[in-house]
Structures are given as structure tokens and as C-alpha cells.
């Protein structure tokens, strides 16, 4: 049985010069050109296959699947089930959303009322027509059962077409590249579908408590303003920057600790402030509260210096470098939050792109290089999650950093930071 060309009676679609969007479509295209259907289905079996779903149904019952079927005049009766690999997904639209599943699943869930044909990447040079009903579906469903273990090692994934490779938008997208490498997503996907509409909404709800457009806007604004991390981190790192300017760069850790204690004690003594509303007097803080604050900041300084020592050993920081700020932790997440909101249909493509641009501009003001930005991001992530375990929260970012600083196609090597 042939799977590749349109059904009998219709001429094949002429294939003009074509650049496959990603390695998945490249492999499908090459296998189809060889007539290697075992190879074609082997690629499909390892890929996420996206299909359109009813947005209202997904909102009402997230665990259910409400497939939307399409039309193709090349198929008898016209009804088809269109499925897409990641690089072939259409641009996001407000009321058109997608979910995904593996190849074998499509054969398992088929019902007699469903279309008789599944079309993979319809209209493209790597399209294929799969009869969806048994017993014919067994010919391609078997590849899902024979799927080898997927390679879960980190790698850089880039859209060759359909995503910017240079310019301000690409720069802003590259600010989120550490997370993209870690999560296995295309770093330059501005038209974001992520892992499908249900999963994108679930991600925002479980990790951020975001279920509405207003909540998404609030967190995005906070991230872009670098206000989603601890102000105590800013105090400690800002104090070190001041000391470094005063002493020509080198900052003794003991002096840094003592300076923090001096500043906190001075601020706790109470003051008189003259403002628009008149004179305001602040009372001195209790000594026990002040000493507890000092102890906490000095512990933080110890954590920062130990993380930086490890990052120097692991090549994230050069020998005498230190982290200037953790704004990158917020700005990198802002670059992704813009896209997560688009994937969850809480924002528009225009809004997401504007936020990505803003993240890129803010990063260029705060840091000197991609390496500096990366170190700030990694430190912020570890202060938030890792608790000096140097586990996956740290190790995964170090690996992603190494990939982005060495892969010839990395945006960190092809896009100037400033």
C-alpha cells in the first residue's frame, strides 16, 4: 500500500524549492523522496503530531479531546483529519487551537464517524495520506508500537523558516534560549504553540497560578520590570557593585558582609522624610529584627559566592567575574511568558512580540554579553529553586549554557548581544 501521493485520480502537488522548517520535516521529506515509508513512519512515531481541537470544549473539559476535522478535495468525500509536525503548525489564531499526541494514538481513537483519511502536513512536500480505518491503519500504527527510546539529551532546536534568525525580535527570543534548550523547544518560535493549547494553559496554572488574561498581563509586566525576584537579592548584589566601583573591581567577601550589616543598621535607626504629604518620621526597628535581617543577608552573600565559585569551575563565569544582577532571571522568563500567554490564547501575537522586544532591550541595558546574561539567569534560578543542592536546577542550566555558547547555530554566537 502506498501512503505518499494523493488518492488515485488526482495529480501530485508540484513541489517547488522548499526549505523544511526543522529537522523533523527534513527527515520526512528525505524519506518520502526515497520512497522509504518505514523511515518516514519511524520519524513520525518519534514526533509530536498536532491536530486542531475545539477551544470551547478544551476550556470546559481540559482532559477531553474535541478534534476538529478538515476538508481536502483530493479525498473522496473531502473529510480529513489534518495533523502537523511542530514546524508545520499554522500561525496562532485566537479561536483556533491545537493539541498533540503520538502516531499510534490516532489509530486507537478512530471511530467509524471519523474521516477516512489522515493527512500529515497537508499541502507540503512532506505530506502523506494515511487511511485511518482498520485494518489499513495497522500498516502505519505498528511503527508507534515499535518506536525506539527517544533521545532526551539537550540540544539546540532552531526553526529554519517561520521564526526570526536575526534582528531585535530574535534577540529578545534568544533571552529565553536557556529554557528552550532545557525544554526541547524551538528557541526562535515567535508564533508559539508550545506543547499544545491544553498543556500551555496547564503550565501557566500549575507554575504561576495564571488562568486569566489579566493575571498573565500582571506577571508579564512584573517580569519585564524585573520585579519577580527577591528585593534582598538586588540589595546584596547592588551593594557589591557599589563596593566594586569604589575599590576598582575586587570585592573582599568579608568586607561585603560587614558593609551589608552597616547599611542595614543605618537604615534601621529611623529617619525623617519630607515629601508632598508633609514630614513623615519612621521609627527605629527592633534590634532583634535588625540582627535577623543582617544574618539573612550575610547567609545570602555566602550562597551567592559559593554559586559563583561553582560557576567559575564549570566555565559559566570567567576567573575574576561575578554576577552583576539577577535581572536576567526575570527577563529570560519574560521572553518565555510572552509566548506562553500566546500559546494559552491569553494574549495576541502582536502583544507577545512587543514583550519579547522589550525583554531584549532591557537585557542589553543590564548586561554586557550573553555570558553575563546567562550567569545572571542561572544564579537567579538557583537562588529561587536549588537551595545549594547543585542538582538539576543548576546542572541543566549549565548544560544549556554550554550548548548555547558552543553550538555553531546558537543565537548567542550569531546575534550580537548589544
Image (spheres, rainbow, N blue to C red):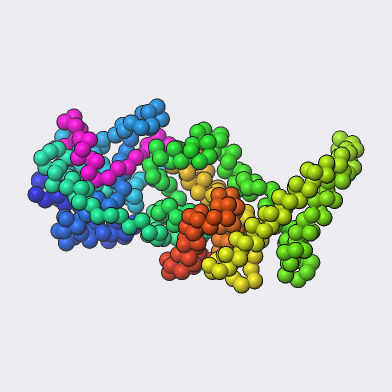
Residue 114 within the segment the image draws in magenta: yes
Is 73 left or right of 17, judged from the image as shown? left
Residue name at image x 38 percent, y 59 percent: 153
Residue situated in front as seen by the camera: 193 or 47: 47
Indicate the position of residue 263 as horizontal and vertical percent values.
81, 54
Q: Which residues are magenta?
A: 93-117
Q: Quadrant of residue 250?
A: bottom right
Q: Residue furthest front?
A: 288
Q: Residue furthest top?
A: 60
Indicate the position of residue 103 as horizontal and vertical percent values.
24, 45
Residue 109 within the segment the image draws in magenta: yes
Residue 263 seen in render: yes
Q: Quadrant of the C terminus?
A: bottom right
Residue name at image x 72 percent, y 55 percent: 298
Residue name at image x 48 percent, y 38 percent: 206
Indicate the position of residue 328 as horizontal and vertical percent values.
59, 55
Seen in the picture, residue 371 relative to 85 is either above or below; the reply is below
Residue situated in front as seen by the camera: 123 or 291: 291
Residue 275 seen in render: no
Number of callouts in the render? Answer: 0
Is 255 left or right of 222, judged from the image as shown? right
Q: Quadrant of residue 7?
A: top left
Indicate the position of residue 302 as horizontal and vertical percent values.
67, 58
Residue name at image x 50 percent, y 41 percent: 207
Amino acid at each position: 500500500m502506498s501512503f505518499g501521493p494523493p488518492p488515485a485520480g488526482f495529480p501530485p502537488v508540484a513541489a517547488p524549492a522548499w526549505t523544511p522548517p526543522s529537522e523533523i520535516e527534513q527527515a520526512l521529506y528525505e524519506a518520502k523522496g526515497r520512497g522509504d515509508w518505514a523511515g518516514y513512519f519511524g520519524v513520525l512515531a518519534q514526533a509530536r503530531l498536532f491536530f486542531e481541537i475545539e477551544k470551547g470544549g478544551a476550556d470546559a473539559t481540559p482532559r477531553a479531546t474535541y478534534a476538529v476535522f478538515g476538508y481536502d478535495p483530493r479525498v473522496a468525500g473531502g473529510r480529513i483529519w489534518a495533523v502537523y509536525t511542530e514546524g508545520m503548525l499554522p500561525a496562532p489564531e485566537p479561536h483556533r487551537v491545537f493539541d498533540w499526541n503520538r502516531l499510534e494514538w490516532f489509530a486507537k481513537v478512530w471511530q467509524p464517524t471519523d474521516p477516512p483519511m489522515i493527512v500529515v502536513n497537508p499541502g507540503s512536500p512532506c505530506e502523506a495520506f494515511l487511511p485511518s480505518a482498520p485494518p489499513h491503519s495497522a500498516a502505519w500504527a505498528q511503527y508507534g508500537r515499535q518506536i525506539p527510546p527517544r533521545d532526551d539529551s539537550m540540544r539546540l532546536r532552531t526553526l529554519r523558516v517561520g521564526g526570526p534568525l536575526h534582528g531585535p525580535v530574535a534577540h529578545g527570543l534568544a533571552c529565553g534560549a536557556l529554557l528552550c534548550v532545557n525544554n526541547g523547544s524551538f528557541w526562535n518560535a515567535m508564533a508559539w504553540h508550545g506543547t499544545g493549547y491544553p498543556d500551555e494553559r496547564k503550565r501557566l496554572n500549575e507554575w504561576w497560578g495564571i488562568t486569566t488574561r489579566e493575571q498573565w498581563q500582571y506577571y508579564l509586566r512584573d517580569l519585564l520590570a524585573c520585579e519577580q525576584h527577591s528585593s534582598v537579592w538586588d540589595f546584596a548584589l547592588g551593594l557589591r557593585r557599589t563596593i566594586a566601583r569604589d575599590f576598582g573591581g575586587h570585592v573582599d567577601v568579608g568586607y561585603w558582609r560587614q558593609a551589608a550589616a552597616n547599611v542595614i543598621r543605618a537604615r534601621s535607626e529611623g529617619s525623617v522624610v519630607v515629601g508632598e504629604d508633609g514630614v513623615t518620621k519612621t521609627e527605629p526597628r527592633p534590634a532583634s529584627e535588625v540582627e535577623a535581617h543582617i544574618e539573612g543577608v550575610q547567609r545570602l552573600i555566602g550562597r551567592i559566592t559559593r554559586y559563583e565559585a561553582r560557576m567559575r569551575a564549570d566555565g559559566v563565569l570567567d576567573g575574576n567575574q561575578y554576577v552583576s544582577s539577577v535581572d536576567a532571571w526575570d527577563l529570560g522568563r519574560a521572553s518565555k511568558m510572552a509566548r506562553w500567554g500566546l500559546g494559552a490564547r491569553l494574549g495576541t501575537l502582536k502583544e507577545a512580540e512587543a514583550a519579547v522586544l522589550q525583554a531584549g532591550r532591557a537585557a542589553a541595558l543590564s548586561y554586557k554579553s550573553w555570558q553575563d546574561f546567562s550567569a545572571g539567569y542561572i544564579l537567579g534560578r538557583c537562588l529561587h529553586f536549588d537551595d545549594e543542592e547543585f542538582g538539576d536546577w543548576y546542572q541543566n542550566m549549565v548544560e544549556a549554557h554550554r550548548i548555547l555558547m558552543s553550538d555553531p547555530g546558537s543565537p548567542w554566537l550569531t546575534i550580537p548581544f548589544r
